[in-house]
Amino acid sequence: MPDTPTTPALLDAFHALLGPAGVLTGADMAPHLTDWRGLYRGRALAVLRPASTEQVAELVRLCAAAGVAMVPQGGNTSMVAGATPDESGGQVVISTARLNRIRDIDPIDMTMVCEAGVILKHAQDAAREAGCLFPLSLGAEGSCTLGGVLSTNAGGNTTVRYGNARELMLGLEAVLPDGSVWHGLRRLRKDNTGYALRHLLVGAEGTLGIITAAALRLFPLPREEAVALCAVADEEAALALFRRFRARDEGVVRAFEYISGAAMDLVLDHVPGAVLPLAARAGHYVLVDLASSRPGAGLRGLLESVLEEALAEGEVIDAALAESEAQRAAIWRLREEQPEGQRRAGASVKNDVSVPLSRVPEMIRRCRAALTALIPGSRPVPFGHIGDGNIHMNLAQPPDMDPAAFLARSEEIMACVNAVVRDLGGSFSAEHGIGRIKTGMMEDWRGGAELAAMRAIKRALDPLGLMNPGKVLP
Ligand code: FAD
Ligand code: MLT
Ligand code: ZN
């Protein structure tokens, strides 16, 4: 059993190890104790800010000896409250904010080694300065960290072309729950040497250890880009358009995103400066983003010719092609502000689901009907990564309903969507993970041998159950 020192002695030990900048207590902890969606308000003994792998390891050893649970936290943008401590006040948050060095960029190997607290946007910028592309891209990229995106196996807008975080990772350095450091920062494309521990930690949401650094894959920078926002006839037309581009040149589709008319309306109505570059609002939109590292790839011509075909078939109703970097950014902003538009419009319930690509239109339509029958006046606001079969089948509250009363029905709303998704062979969490919000679904969806194996792995690596308890596993 761990030998539990008194809290003041433990806090003294944290201070001695990290210095004053490394330990937050009292009101200074506030931003670290709530989740991005504002659904939970936790408490903590302290927020600890180690500045090196050695300090993380020593902290983990101190906590393990004291029996204190640890909650790893990067940018705290989790959509499932994965980085929020519980209400007991007995946990510590281990923030990676000061693990923020880019250790190495190698344009020949096309690899980059970064510490876990490096902000995703900073990693993208550093890669670009070295003449390379780090392609992971999502709305939270200005504040989420590499440790966070790896721990949630984040997807985002470019998964359709480059894969999700897992596919961009070659090796990891991590502190395991007993405080030992695993030096796995190998930068190899091929390395079959036993169990792939690195892949266990990716997507583990901080329940198996703390990632302190990662070796990541880089790609050639695009030399040509072409972006358009299209109004499309319906969900089938959105999918048909994706298939047209894929058939013509799969390799150039960097992003293919769907936005329902209702979701776009929330952004246009609530986010200052959001402007639709089309003649009229529509029921469905698609954002097409093409990119190629090949000079003279002719992407503009490809975009125009595929859209002309789709216009002739009645799939596309109208389209705006970006003529400048400013227009490209303005189109992307309409997509990136989707979570913010929904946040400003009142309470909403998120359903981050995936189904086989061919079933996406049916999924959206069935969920929309089921949700409005469940809560009359509520507004289904689906949008997301249709090219990956991953739609955020979110539901905004009826305008005249009390937000708390609406949120009190979250479980029912998620169950309503999940019933359709299960029927279509999908997943209840495509990219946001399980965190705290979805642990209750694990038994039903992953029970039996799969959950038993996960529990056995957790017990083997974290026998004291101190790494982010209450997350992922029910
Ligand atoms: P946090 O929120 O701090 O933590 C997330 C989880 O990882 C927690 O369980 C935490 O304990 C754990 N963790 C964090 N750092 C470490 C570490 N170093 N070692 C071990 N565990 C760690 N996600 C997508 O997949 N696709 C999207 O398109 C997308 N868009 C988003 C848009 C917005 C506006 C927002 C707010 C979020 C979005 N997300 C998206 C959610 C997504 O999960 C996060 O943005 C990102 O992956 C989390 O990074 P973070 O640094 O904020 O991690
Ligand atoms: C996004 O893709 O913008 C986020 O993952 C989705 C959300 O807010 O539901
Ligand atoms: Zn998403």
Image (cartoon, helix red, strand yellow):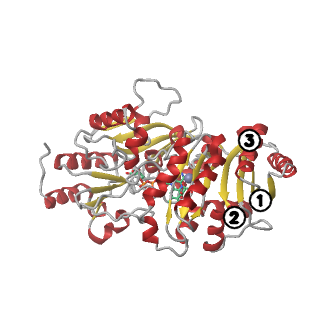
* Residue drawn at 25 percent across, 47 percent down: 466
Percent x, y of residue 431 = 51, 47
- CA gap, disc 1 and disc 3: 21 Å
In this view, the residue in front, 471 or 425, is 425
- Count neighbours of disc 2 (C-alpha within 10 A) and say few if under 14, some if 14 to 19, many if 20 or more: some
Which residue lies under the disc numbered 1?
322
Quadrant of the image containing the N terminus: top left
Q: Are marks 1 and 2 in contact (CB under 8 Å)?
A: yes
Q: Residue 443 lies in what quarter of the image?
A: top left
Percent x, y of residue 274 = 67, 70
* Residue drawn at 56 percent across, 45 percent down: 354
Percent x, y of residue 168 = 54, 40
Residue 381 in view of the camera: yes
SS label for mark 3: helix
* Residue drawn at 60 percent across, 56 percent down: 369
Q: Is residue 450 left or right of residue 377?
A: left
Q: Amino acid at mark 3?
A: Arg
In this view, the residue in front, 419 or 291, is 419
Question: Does residue 186 lie above or below 332 as drawn?
Answer: above
Decide which of tag 1 and tag 2 comes sooner along the chain.
Answer: 1
Q: Amino acid at mark 2?
A: Ala
In this view, the residue in front, 405 or 3, is 405
Which residue sits furthest top?
193
Q: How many marks?
A: 3
Which residue lies under the disc numbered 2?
330
Q: Nearer the viewer, mark 1 or mark 3?
A: 3
Q: Amino acid at mark 1?
A: Ala
Residue 219 in view of the camera: no
Question: Does residue 459 lie above or below 158 as drawn?
Answer: above
